[in-house]
Amino acid sequence: MSTNNANITSDEQIHLLDDLQSLLEKQIEMARRSNFRSVEVLAEQADSVVDEIVRTRAFEQDEFNNRRECLAKLYKGLELMLAAEKNHVDKQLQRISEGKKTLRAYRGNG
């Protein structure tokens, strides 16, 4: 009986890890397309999957070490893409702010 439960749990864990990998890959693709609303929606879904992975303790099992490493690399790649986009947006906001200051200065001198 415990063997069946272990198999079911293992199958469930594999399915959850597959789901998380798929969601991370989709997030990366959406980030490449600058579709950050979709990235956010997928992140919410991924959070639920991660909660289930934690519940099933999949990351604690040696048999999933390779999967854990693969998921960590995907997550790191997504994190880097989002950080680069944030940097890009910050620079754009800075330019806009500088432009507004310039316009105010022209209005004040006119």
Image: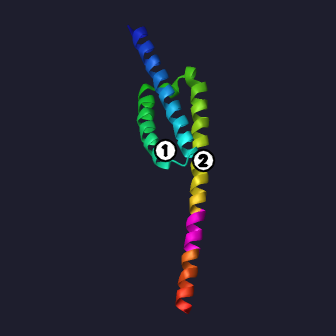
Give the magenta part as a residue range: 91-98
Badge 2 marks a residue whose secondary structure is: helix
- What residue sits right under mark 2 in the picture? 81
From the viewer's perspective, is residue 25 above or below residue 56? below
Label 2 Cα crowd, 10 Å radius (few <14 / some 14-19 / many 20+): some
The structure residue drawn at horizontal position 42% and vertical position 15%, both measured from the top left corner, is: 8
Can you tell which quarter of the image residue 45 is in?
A: top left
Badge 1 marks a residue whose secondary structure is: helix
Q: Main secondary structure of the magenta part?
A: helix
The structure residue drawn at horizontal position 53% and vertical position 90%, both measured from the top left corner, is: 108
**Which amino acid lies under the numbered mark 1 shown in the image of this protein?**
Val
**Which amino acid lies under the numbered mark 2 shown in the image of this protein?**
Met
- Give residue 4's mark: none
Of labels 1 and 2, earlier in sequence is 1
Q: In the image, is residue 95 part of the stretch drawn in magenta?
A: yes
Label 1 Cα crowd, 10 Å radius (few <14 / some 14-19 / many 20+): many
Residue nearest the viewer, comparing 22 with 32:
32
Residue nearest the viewer, comparing 10 with 103:
103
